Amino acid sequence: MRVNRIEELARAAETYPLLADLPPEHLPKLLEIAEERWFEENEIIFPEGARSERLFLIASGRIALETMAGGQRIVIQTLGAGDTMGWSALTETTTTHFQARALTRVQTIAFDGVALRVAFKENHNLGFEIMKRLLALVTERLDHTRMQLIDMYGKRAAKRS
Amino acid sequence: MGTPFGMELTGDASGTKGIPVGALRRMGVPTLGQLINALRQRGYQVIGPVLRDGAISYGPIGNLADLPAGWTSEENPASYRLKRRSDDALFGYATGPKSMKDFLHVSEIHTFTVDRTDGPFRILPNSEAPPRYAFLGVRGCDIAAMFVQDRVLLGGMPADPFYENRRRNCLIIAVHCTEPANTCFCTSMGTGPRARDFDLALTEFVDSDSHHFLVEVGSEAGAELLEQLPVEMASAEMAGRSQTLTERARRAMTRQLDKDRAARLLQENFDSPQWDRVAEKCLACGNCTMVCPTCFCVTFEDSSDITGTHVERWRKWDSCFSLAFSYIHGGSVRSSTKSRYRQWLTHKLSSWVDQFGSSGCVGCGRCITWCPVGIDLTEEVKAIQATSPAE
Amino acid sequence: MSLADPMCPLLVRISEVVRETHDTCTLTTVAANGERLPSFLPGQFSMVSEFGTGEIPISISGDAEMPDQLVYTIRSVGKVSDALIRHKPGDYIGLRGSFGTAWPVKAARGQDLLLVAGGIGLAPLRPVISHIARHRNDYGRFLLLYGARTPKDLLFRKQLRAWGKLHDAQVHITVDGADSKWRGHVGVVTRLFDFAALRPERTIAMTCGPEIMMHFAIRALRARNVVNDRIFLSMERNMKCAVGFCGHCQMGPLFICKDGPVFAYSQVDRWLERHHEL
């Protein structure tokens, strides 16, 4: 049952930028590590500052990345279907940078970070393919974050009366 | 001619009894005094060259004695000096800091008043009786500049009513330029040294035994004016001498600007390193825009009494060299001196052509003379050309 | 000789003030002395006078089919706008015109409409949405992507909900930052394109907001195969006269006041792509 659901998701791999156009020979290894995980509305998927354990692909639902600022919990970014989350699981000895909270019921495909790192070490081609896509995603996310940092609607940066 | 852009002259040159349009006459100096009188009697305020603030400027003229007899100016980049001439020429100078712009597109004008002293708000437009100007002694470049401003201020919908009111009634008595300044380049821009589109045009001859003028009649209004004055037929020799003098002036001008090439060049060289170099010198003071006879930018300011019951809005000249000029909340669009100089020069020589069908420069050289650091736009264009990848 | 001065404003009375956010109000104005108000097309602007302080360009944010009033949504960003939003109903201000070019509302009939708005940039697009709401059957799919700084900065909140309920319409909202009470999207407005099922060959896109936001929005549109002729934007510059003779609002050979403020991207791409403080 578990395997069937994962395979079904794997057939939709194209909908995840992290897996799009991945050479097909790599999929079985990823499916071996993948597990389906559900989170209920408001459930903390991972807390801020915890050991990073899993990389998630969001299949459905919405997630808020949160942190504490000025004594209150603020939302940095929201993520949805197709997005990748928990990159720090791919780097050794790091912790999560934000808290991830389910805004709705959320379906994910989760990959154990240690298992992924071992798989990448054994098969550099697989590691390269995934890391290459991840870099593109990180770049895009960084671009978006920079745009947020511009504070373009703020009074200093905005240019529209 | 006194006719604003877009309004055709109607009327028949043969309608005036004695002197046809195109005629040439000889006129002595005292007759010029009578001409000034005749203009004043017809209700014109005569504007001509006057010595003021250490320069030959344009200002109200009451009689011959107001003209700067025996004075000239020496102009170089960042330098203007009055000098005594060896003769008593009345128009023996090139350009001063003022132009017809100072009178037709005035530097400050009250546009309307809002009054609520009696309770309700009332908006009272400025319903001035505009002055009627007769310009005496203006040059080909000045007249060309006025036509450039016509296209900006009268060519659109709506027209600028304050400019139109002044422009529609003015009379032009030009003087052909025979001694250009070192900063002049009107030949490059096709605006001089011979004046065009005048009511009357004078060529001044100062000889040891005689001081007189050749008068060319450019319009019926000019002919009609001349008929009242004691003028004589002009000799062919005088006409030839006038041509010789302006031809000599044409050859005396060393500064050059290829206007068609400049228009293309500036479109293609927003990235020229020359913009950085000129920005190191430019003080962004805006002098060039103030003395330029075509620069037309204005801003608006409100002033009110302390109770706020009487408010006036004023229109004032503005300059694209100020940081505030392009301000929108969050900052100025053109925040660097480099971008502001580039805007001025590119607009003047290039995008002006796209907007109004002619260059915004008439080659009068005022911006070179009055720039405190002597930036010379003809040299800037050459420097950009030298570094242009397309050249 | 007395010519009508195009710089002389019309006196109008403020009939209603709606506080939209902490720094933004919507003023409804009506003729003060029985004169007729100028008509307008969606996207046009007026010069709004606070007597004694000055005059600023403000896009008209009302319904073009309500000729007895002119509506302005004004954000306090300077001394004139700050004075304007402090008015109460019954106060008087001055107006000049409806000026400039309009959104291609007529030309877009039969097309899908995608509106991308940022911050106060939703105000100049509101007349388009009012038009679509009135003539819903004349248009295809309607999509509004709207970004603001925080949830508190969202304009026209009630209307946003109503617009989302129009037939075949989607309204997606995102903010740059929020506290954890906010259930909507957090992130830049371009991320909302992920939710927009675009048919590029039959879409007319209109964008209005900070120039940097429009720049990113246009990049996202082009990445989704919407061509430059189908992308329209509204530019802002320091307009003083609004009729092309004060010189302030130039960008290259364009006068934003009379050649714009609304442009097809194909008209302005060569100027905007330069990033040259033009």
Image (cartoon, coloured by chain):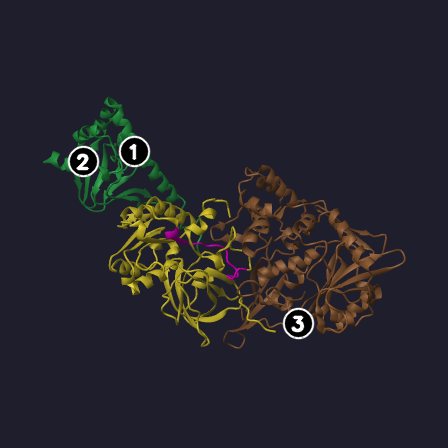
Q: Amino acid at mark 2?
A: Ala
The circle drawn on residue B10 is none
The residue that disc 3 covers is B11
Foreground pick, B307 / C131: C131
Q: Is B378 part of what is drawn in magenta?
A: no
Name the residue rendered at 48%, 56% in the picture.
C256
Tell which residue pokes out farthest to the top in this image. A122
Callout 3 amino acid: Gly
The hue in which chain B appears in the rendered picture of the protein: brown
Dominant SS of magenta comes to loop
- Residue B130 visible in the shown view: yes
Q: Which mark is residue A10?
A: 2
* Dot 1: chain letter: A
The alpha-carbon separation of the residues under discs 3 and 1 comes to 81 Å
| SS at circle 2 | helix
- Callout 3 secondary element: loop
Residue C234 in the magenta stretch? The answer is yes
Name the mark nearer the viewer: 1 or 2: 2
Residue at x-position 39% and y-position 71%: C67
Q: Chain of mark 2?
A: A
Q: Please say if the residues under marks 1 and 2 sit with CB atoms less than 8 Å apart.
A: no
Colour of chain A, in one word, is: green
In the rendered structure, which segment of residues is drawn in magenta? Answer: C229-244
The quadrant of the image that shows the N terminus of chain A is top left
Where in the figure is residue C234, as x and y percent of width and height? Answer: 42, 55
Q: From the image, state the color of chain C.
A: yellow
Q: Where is residue B120 drawn, in percent x and y? A: 49, 76
Amino acid residing under circle 1: Leu
**Foreground of the two, C221 or A155:** C221
How far is disc 2 from disc 3 in space, using C-alphas?
89 Å
